[in-house]
Each structure stands twice: as structure tokens, then as C-alpha cells.
């Protein structure tokens, strides 16, 4: 079977990547979404092995030392990484693979998978992004501050990506993503 295509979705925390990806997967069940590892504490409702593999720093660093991650990065004080084996297996089986990761990880994947397709999701405005992060109601004020600071760096890098989409209206953003990924014509 021909190797599957790798797509990366990046964009500032709170932009709605998770919702967009969930909608995409519901419509296109053949797409395989990588489950990342993180040292962040689970949020309410997050399930181990489904939302993330929740690891402590020691466990995470062991996997880094064993080259177990395709990419990894520190984000707002926590470590996040894409487990390598599962992604490689899915691609080898010819499945389309999706990674939802932050900027540094996307840059690493760009180097190791130059043929991959990378999409950047923007908010309609910075004020709207801040509103969305706050309305999630799960992060401390300090964590919100770190995420907003990081969002400015990520937004400045949007032009590095193969495609940019604005997540204002969810249905429209989904249609744009499907078109960019070649899922609809
Ligand atoms: P959150 O803590 O809100 O779930 O995620 C914070 C950021 O980490 C988001 O931008 C998310 O896309 C990113 N992220 C999630 N998993 C990974 C990963 O495996 N690698 C990298 N580099 N970033 C990730």
C-alpha cells in the first residue's frame, strides 16, 4: 500500500483546533489522529490514552532519550510529544495521519517529513482568542498569560505554513480545511 499522507495542524492555544479536528474526524473516519504524550495534568473530562498519554517528566524524558518521539517541545511549562512508532505504522499502512501540535513541533516535523502538509489555524482576532482561552475556564491566570504570550509568537509564524485558515465560523473553517486537505473538491 502507498504510504499515507501526513498533515500537521498548528495554531495558538484556544483557537479551536481541537473542535475543528473532532469535526473533521467525525466526517472522515479514515483519518488517524495521533495521541500525544504530555506532562501537563489532565483537564476535567480528559481521558488517559484518548486525550493524551499523561506522563511525568521522568517518563517523558526517558522516551526522549530512547528517540521515542517523532517531535517534542515544551509549551507553557509542560512537555508535549508525538509517539513515533504509531505514526510510522499508520503511514506505512497507507492511512492519512493527522498531528495537532504546536509551532516548534511543526517545525521539527517539517524537517523530517518535508512532503507533509502543514496548516495553520488563526483566530479572527487576538481579542477573540483571549476570550476563547478564558471561556474554557480550565487554566490558571498564570497559564492563560503564558498561552497568550506564546500565541503572539505562533501567530507571527503563520506564513511558514502551506495553508492558513481563519477559524471564525466553524462550518466554514471545516470546509476550508477539507478543501486544503483535498478531501472535497
Ligand atoms: P493543551 O495543553 O491546550 O492541550 O495543548 C497545548 C499546545 O500543545 C497546543 O497548541 C497543542 O496543539 C500542542 N500539542 C499537543 N500535543 C502536542 C505534541 O505532541 N507535540 C507538540 N509539539 N505540541 C503538542
Image (cartoon, rainbow, N blue to C red):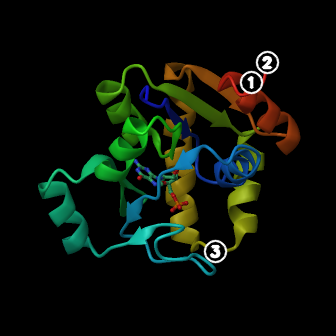
- Tell me the crowding category of disc 2: few under 14, some 14 to 19, or many 20 or more residues within 10 angstroms, Cα based: few
Distance of mark 1 from mark 2, alpha carbons? 6 Å
| Residues at marks 3 and 2 touching, judged by CB atoms closer than 8 Å | no
Q: Nearer the viewer, residue 182 or 137?
A: 182
Which residue has dot 1 on it? Answer: 179
Q: Which mark is residue 20?
A: none
Q: Is residue 104 left or right of residue 95?
A: left
The percent position of residue 87, horizontal first and vertical second, equals 38, 46
Q: Which mark is residue 185?
A: 2
- Tell me the crowding category of disc 1: few under 14, some 14 to 19, or many 20 or more residues within 10 angstroms, Cα based: few
Q: Nearer the viewer, residue 12 or 153?
A: 12
| Residues at marks 1 and 2 touching, judged by CB atoms closer than 8 Å | yes
Looking at this view, name the residue that lies furthest to the front: 1
- Residue in view at x 62 percent, y 22 percent: 163
Q: Which mark is residue 138?
A: 3
Q: Is residue 149 visible?
A: yes
Quadrant into which the N terminus falls: top left
- Residue in view at x 43 percent, y 25 percent: 2
Amino acid at each position: 500500500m502507498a504510504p499515507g499522507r501526513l498533515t500537521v495542524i498548528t495554531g495558538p492555544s484556544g483557537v479551536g483546533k481541537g473542535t475543528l479536528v473532532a469535526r473533521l474526524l467525525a466526517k472522515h473516519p479514515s483519518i488517524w489522529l495521533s495521541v500525544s504524550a504530555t506532562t501537563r495534568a489532565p483537564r476535567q473530562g480528559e481521558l488517559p490514552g484518548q486525550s493524551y498519554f499523561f506522563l511525568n517528566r521522568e517518563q517523558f524524558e526517558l522516551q526522549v532519550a530512547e528517540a521515542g518521539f517523532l517531535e517534542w517541545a515544551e509549551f507553557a511549562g509542560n512537555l508535549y510529544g508525538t509517539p513515533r512508532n504509531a505514526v510510522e505504522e499508520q503511514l506505512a499502512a497507507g492511512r492519512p495521519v493527522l498531528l495537532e501540535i504546536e509551532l516548534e513541533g511543526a517545525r521539527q516535523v517539517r524537517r523530517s517529513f518535508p512532503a507533509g502538509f502543514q496548516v495553520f489555524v488563526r483566530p479572527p482576532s487576538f481579542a477573540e482568542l483571549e476570550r476563547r482561552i478564558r471561556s474554557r475556564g480550565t487554566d490558571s491566570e498564570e497559564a492563560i498569560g503564558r498561552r497568550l504570550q506564546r500565541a503572539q509568537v505562533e501567530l507571527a509564524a503563520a506564513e511558514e505554513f502551506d495553508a492558513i485558515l481563519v477559524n471564525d465560523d466553524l462550518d466554514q473553517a471545516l470546509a476550508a480545511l477539507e478543501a486544503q486537505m483535498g478531501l472535497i473538491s
